[in-house]
Amino acid sequence: MNNSLTNVSVRQLERAIKIKAKLETLQAQLDEVLGGDGTEIPSPFRKKRRMSAAGRAAIAAGARRRWAKIKGEATAPAAAKKPRRKMSAAAKARMSAVAKERWKKAKAAGKTTL
């Protein structure tokens, strides 16, 4: 269907003008109700996602590894991951004693959660 202006009658043009005027009136009413220009209605539910620098670095490193694999290049070995720090038995015992004391006080107060 071709909507060229050369193939449109005067009656069709008048009807199109009336419809356009109605649309503009309704848009003005909508803007008045919503209190804006009506171009964008902000959603309270959609929040911008954020990514940490470490997350971006991990994604970039993975992409570099994938491209190197495709190209057949040897990748540099990834930096050795630091071993997890171990807690001494004495520190574990101190933390356990503190937690038990906290729970003892909470239960004496009749609480089931801290």
Image: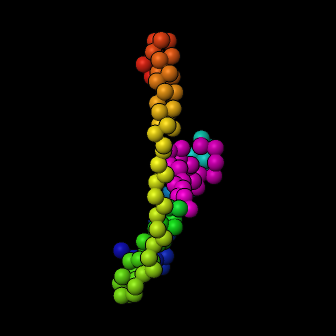
Quadrant of res 29? top right
Note whether 65 is above or below 95 in the view shown: below
Span highlighted in magenta in the image: 34-53
Residue placed most toward the observer, 54 or 101: 101
Residue 27 in picture, x, y percent from top left: 57, 51
- Residue 46 colored in magenta in the image: yes
Q: Position of residue 81 (x, y in %)?
A: 46, 64
**Residue 92: % across, % down:** 47, 37
The residue at the far front in this view is 90
- The main secondary structure of the magenta stretch is loop
Q: In the image, 73: left or right of 40?
A: left
Give the camera-side residue of 79 and 66.
Answer: 79
Depth order, front residue of 6/109? 109
Does residue 25 show up? no
Between 91 and 38, the residue placed more toward the observer is 91
In magenta segment, residue 51? yes
> In the image, is residue 9 above or below residue 44?
below
Q: How is the image coloured?
A: rainbow
> Which residue occupies 64% across, 48% down?
36
| Side of 17 relative to 35 (left or right) | left
Q: Is residue 45 above or below residue 72?
A: above
Q: Residue at x 36, y 82 (%)?
A: 69
